[in-house]
């Protein structure tokens, strides 16, 4: 045994802690070992020094403070409280995180390209432009414009055609659709691109500085521009060109050279733009953020669940990271929902974790838990504002906030709660649960959101408060197998301003409607009123009409939810309640008749009209935003009989957007108030004169070559208050006067002497007789052909201007003020 | 009054009886914690916690340990916990490191030599420091230390010996040995 091994025994010897045998052994050794004697002396001195520490500062009395703590502790069943408090908190936090993850669904966030592609795929306009053919491929063509990186150009292809579309990621709408033809990539294109690039002096310079050519990518780029054709019509034209991107690596920096393969020139050289970097960041965040959030959430729960400092530290740090991620995303303006998530979960949780740790353990100064509580309160106040005062609250966020509030109250009042006698716990718990059940039973948060009828009521309410919106309207009408299509882009600004661009069978008209005044472009169809011609009783162009649709839908069926323009939508199918509408119409007509001196619309006419209405079947499919209850899309299908045996069907799809976004609709007037060139005015004035024109034919004579035809035409002035002066009636029928190009107008003679002045509600009967050759017409066809006669009513307005209105013998308003060159109805 | 009697009274619900125990033990316990942590204010806080825990413990358990050993065991655990917390908190924002600095500033007992001894002691690993303080400052026998810390007498002997050697080393190196 060496001296070194004896050190432990020497130490114990110095302390008098050895057994007798050990002591004797050491003493024997010490006698013969100077080193060990020195060590012992050192050990003894060290012991003495340490013993000097027995002198401590005068102890202050902690007895009183300690006793008050002990009394507080012994008075309350702290153990019981603690036993449920921590699990309750962790369950609460879990509820917050899980509901928020479910509500916000960050994992369904898509990359901009995928989002744009899904917008394009679900767009009815795109589907229409592709004739309903299956979309084979949606390709991003790299034209990331706009400093936010919000507009993407997409190339959409089916087997046979391709269209270029641009998608605005902000509004999640397809903003442009243009048919294009797509050139194929040619073999050798890459080499050709390289040759073109190498001929460019800038590329030569890059290469001279030591740049190394990397990858070569071929891509399509789309250019959409306004082209005015020889016919003066402006339209959008898209061209697809092949562009090659050549990457040159120089000093660790990637330069990209864009080569226009058609014009064989270098379009530009650059380093990746900010927009591209943003897109990449966005992609990165959307792919990794969800798992990170989940992990952080789990850490938070663990931190609250376990009284373990490591877990708490992890929770605190995870809250901090949550905050940083949220701030980062917010700074880059990527999505406000992330910020809300962070505010709802991150800040209160961070405050809670820090506050709890401190209040319980007195780890830091008092200001730390206090500032934590302030942070929590701010976050909660902000969220209350967002979810309750701003009407886009979702139940998950409300639950989350409620749980956080309860948690904070419990911890803030921890000491007080602890003092509540144990016997009150059970009654308090029962009362609390009963209160929650009562509140749930009264508010019924689940029922309101599920019943289609109440959803429509909410939509009505939400839409009513909307000041501006847009919708694009796409409709087709099929009569006897012939289809015509019409498109409208409508902007609405409350209370009564509309701007409408209409395209019917390829012809374009523009309307601006302000109150009762309608401005139309000159080529608009016969100056007809857009409101009147937008389609019988199913007009949905106005906001009022849209609200009526919401009120009058019955037989509602709930269909699977769908996403429209990136918005999750509730989806319903409803039937138009025709009887309700007939009753409304009947009331309107009766009121109108009561105001007039004579019956402008007879009971017989009315019932005939209602009969027709009853035979029409109208269904509405409605998509309603799940969060804001705004109408996103409506599809209306109508089917009904037309004439005697025909069937007509119409389909209209309206897609609503741009709610409450600024819209300016001004009359097309110059500074002096004169109409701008190309515009005219169509006013719904009470002085505007309309006639009700009914025609009956009498055919006499046996010989088909010499038939005598007598037309009895009854003209009623249905104006609100104007008198029609010197009313003259003429008739012509090109059908019956077959072979006669210059069909003459036949003057009809009034039953009273001329001039015929018709006051409001007054009628006059005119007679026109002529002989004609009907030998080329089969007997039963004659009646039908006669019905196609055109009646021209010429009159003087109250201002003394001569005006003309055209009607068909069937009583309908002729669609144009100018009689057609070819007979109608063929 | 005998300690055992006081404890029996406390168990019977006489909370105030515990005040006598505090009065008796507060000075040594605070001193002990002060020597272990080097922070007098913290030692006072920890001593309060120690007595509260001891009170709850009395109600809950029929301790097989002597009361003194048991009280010191609680105090030791609190001191250990405190030092762990201090280490951990240095990683988390919002916490100050003031207390680490206070050690040098706060000198309620002033003889220069004592300061050197105190500082050398604080540089010795916790387990060994505990044994040194219990033995030399609190006058515990090795057996009592073993009981308090829940370890064997051999372990105590080892720790004291190693701690003592380390103390000599640190004390000499830091210049305390010049005297």
Image (tube, rainbow, N blue to C red):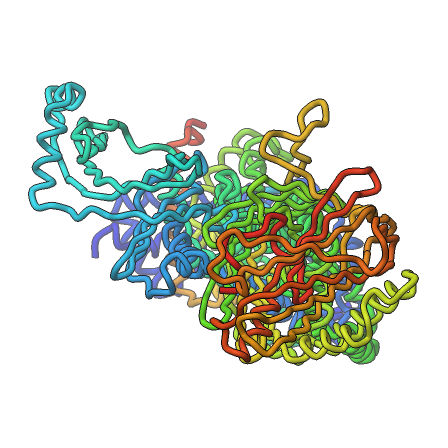
Looking at the picture, does residue A732 appear above or below residue A426?
above
Residue A665 figure quarter: top right
Q: How many marks?
A: 0
Looking at the picture, does residue A81 appear above or below residue A390?
below
**The N terminus of chain A is located in which quarter?**
bottom left
Looking at the picture, does residue B92 appear above or below residue B159?
above
**Residue at 73% over, 69% down:** A551
- Decide if residue B10 is on the left or right side of residue A721: left
Q: Is residue A452 visible?
A: no
**Residue at 44% over, 61% down:** A122
- Give the image location of residue B43, x and y in percent: 63, 48
**Closer-to-camera residue (A793/A625):** A793
**Residue at 82% over, 75% down:** A603
- Give the image location of residue A259, x and y in percent: 20, 32
- Decide if residue A681 is on the left or right side of residue B135: right
- Give the image location of residue A507, x and y in percent: 48, 48
Residue A194 figure quarter: top left
- Give the image location of residue A319, x and y in percent: 54, 51
**Closer-to-camera residue (A20/A150):** A150
- Decide if residue A187 is on the left or right side of residue A314: left
Q: Is residue A478 visible?
A: yes
Looking at the picture, does residue A339 appear above or below residue A679?
below
**Closer-to-camera residue (A739/A816):** A739
**Closer-to-camera residue (A343/A161):** A161
**Residue at 76% over, 49% down:** A61
């Amino acid at each position: 045994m060496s001296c070194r091994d004896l050190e432990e025994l020497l130490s114990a010897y110095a302390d008098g802690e050895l057994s007798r045998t050990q002591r004797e052994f050491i003493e024997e050794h010490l006698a013969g070992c100077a080193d060990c004697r020195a060590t012992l002396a050192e050990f003894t001195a060290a012991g003495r020094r340490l013993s000097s520490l027995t002198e401590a500062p005068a102890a202050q009395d902690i007895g009183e403070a300690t006793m008050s703590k002990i009394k507080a502790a012994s008075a309350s069943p702290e153990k019981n409280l603690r036993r449920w408090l921590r699990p309750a908190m962790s369950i609460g936090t879990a509820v917050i995180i899980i509901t928020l993850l479910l509500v916000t669904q960050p994992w369904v966030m898509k990359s901009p390209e995928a989002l744009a592609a899904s917008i394009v795929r679900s767009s009815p306009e795109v589907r229409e432009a592709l004739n309903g053919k299956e979309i084979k491929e949606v390709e991003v063509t790299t034209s990331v414009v706009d400093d936010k990186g919000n507009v993407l150009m997409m190339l959409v292809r089916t087997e046979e055609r391709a269209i270029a579309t641009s998608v605005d990621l902000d509004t999640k709408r397809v903003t442009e659709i243009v048919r294009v033809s797509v050139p194929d990539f040619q073999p050798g294109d890459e080499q050709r691109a390289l040759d073109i690039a190498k001929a460019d002096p800038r590329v030569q310079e890059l290469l001279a500085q030591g740049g190394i050519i990397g990858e070569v990518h071929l891509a399509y780029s789309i250019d959409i521009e306004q082209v005015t054709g020889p016919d003066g019509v402006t339209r959008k034209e898209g061209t697809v060109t092949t562009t090659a991107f050549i990457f040159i690596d120089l000093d660790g920096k990637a330069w990209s050279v864009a080569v226009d393969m058609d014009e064989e020139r270098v379009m530009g050289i650059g380093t990746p733009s900010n927009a591209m970097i943003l897109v990449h960041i966005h992609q990165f965040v959307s792919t990794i953020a969800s798992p990170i959030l989940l992990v952080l959430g789990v850490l938070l729960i663990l931190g609250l669940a376990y009284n373990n400092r490591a877990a708490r530290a992890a929770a605190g740090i995870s809250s901090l990271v949550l905050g940083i991620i949220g701030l980062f995303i917010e700074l880059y303006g990527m999505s406000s929902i992330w910020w809300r998530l962070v505010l709802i979960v991150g800040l209160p949780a961070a405050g809670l974790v820090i506050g709890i740790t401190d209040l319980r353990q007195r780890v830091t100064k008092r200001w730390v838990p206090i500032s934590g509580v302030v942070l929590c309160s701010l976050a909660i106040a902000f969220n209350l504002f967002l979810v309750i005062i701003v009407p886009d609250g979702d139940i998950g966020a409300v639950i989350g906030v409620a749980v956080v509030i309860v948690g904070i109250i419990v911890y803030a009042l921890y000491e007080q709660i602890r003092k509540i006698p144990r016997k009150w716990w059970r009654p308090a718990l029962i009362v609390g649960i009963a209160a929650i059940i009562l509140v749930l039973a009264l508010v019924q948060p689940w029922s309101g959101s599920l019943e289609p009828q109440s959803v429509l009521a909410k939509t009505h309410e939400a839409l009513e408060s909307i000041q501006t919106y847009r919708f694009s309207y796409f409709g087709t009408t099929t009569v006897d197998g012939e289809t015509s299509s019409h498109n409208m882009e409508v902007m609405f600004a409350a209370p009564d301003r509309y701007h409408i661009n209409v395209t019917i069978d390829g012809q374009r008209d523009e309307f601006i409607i302000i109150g009762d005044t309608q401005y139309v472009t000159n080529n608009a169809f016969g100056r007809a009123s857009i409101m009147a011609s937008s389609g019988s009783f199913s007009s949905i162009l106005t906001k009022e009409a849209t609200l009526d649709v919401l009120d009058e839908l019955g037989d509602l069926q709930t269909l699977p939810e769908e996403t429209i323009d990136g918005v999750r939508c509730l989806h319903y199918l409803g039937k138009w309640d025709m009887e309700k509408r007939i009753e409304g119409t009947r009331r309107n007509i009766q009121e109108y008749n009561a105001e007039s001196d004579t019956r402008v619309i007879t009971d017989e006419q009315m019932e005939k009209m209602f009969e027709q209405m009853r035979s029409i079947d109208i269904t509405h499919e409605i998509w309603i935003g799940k969060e804001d209850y705004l109408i996103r899309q409506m599809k209306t299908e109508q089917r009904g009989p037309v004439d005697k045996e025909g069937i007509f069907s119409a389909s209209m799809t309206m897609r609503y957007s741009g709610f409450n976004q600024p819209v300016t609709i001004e009359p097309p007037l110059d500074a002096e108030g004169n109409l701008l060139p190309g515009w005219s005015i169509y006013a719904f004035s009470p002085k505007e004169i309309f006639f009700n024109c009914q025609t009956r034919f009498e055919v006499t004579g046996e010989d088909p070559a010499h038939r005598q035809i007598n037309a009895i035409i009854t003209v009623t002035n249905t104006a609100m208050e104007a008198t029609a002066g010197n009313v003259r009636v003429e008739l012509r029928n090109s059908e019956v006067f077959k072979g006669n190009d210059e069909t003459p107008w036949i003057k009809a003679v009034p039953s009273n002497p001329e001039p015929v002045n018709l006051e409001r509600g007054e009628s006059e009967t005119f007679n026109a007789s002529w002989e004609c050759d009907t030998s080329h017409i089969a007997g039963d066809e004659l009646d039908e052909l006669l019905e196609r006669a055109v009646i021209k009513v010429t009159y003087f307005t109250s201002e003394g201007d001569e005006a003309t209105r055209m009607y068909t013998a069937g009583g309908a308003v002729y669609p144009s003020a100018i009689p057609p060159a070819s007979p109608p109805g063929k | 009054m005998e300690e055992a009697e006081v404890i029996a009274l406390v168990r019977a619900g006489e909370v105030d009886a515990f005040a006598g125990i505090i009065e008796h033990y507060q000075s040594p316990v605070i001193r002990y914690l002060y020597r272990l942590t080097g922070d007098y204010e913290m030692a006072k806080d920890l001593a309060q916690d120690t007595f509260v825990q001891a009170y709850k413990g009395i109600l809950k358990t029929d301790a097989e340990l002597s009361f003194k050993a048991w009280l010191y065991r609680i105090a030791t655990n609190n001191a250990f916990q405190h030092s762990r917390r201090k280490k951990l908190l240095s990683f988390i924002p919002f916490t100050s490191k003031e207390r680490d600095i206070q050690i040098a500033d706060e000198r309620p007992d002033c003889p220069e030599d004592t300061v050197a001894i105190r500082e050398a002691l604080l540089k010795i690993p916790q387990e060994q420091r505990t044994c040194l303080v219990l033995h030399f400052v609190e006058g515990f026998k090795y057996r009592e230390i073993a009981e308090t810390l829940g370890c064997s007498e051999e372990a105590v002997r080892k720790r004291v010996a190693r701690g003592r050697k380390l103390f000599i080393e640190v004390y000499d190196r830091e210049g305390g040995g010049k005297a």
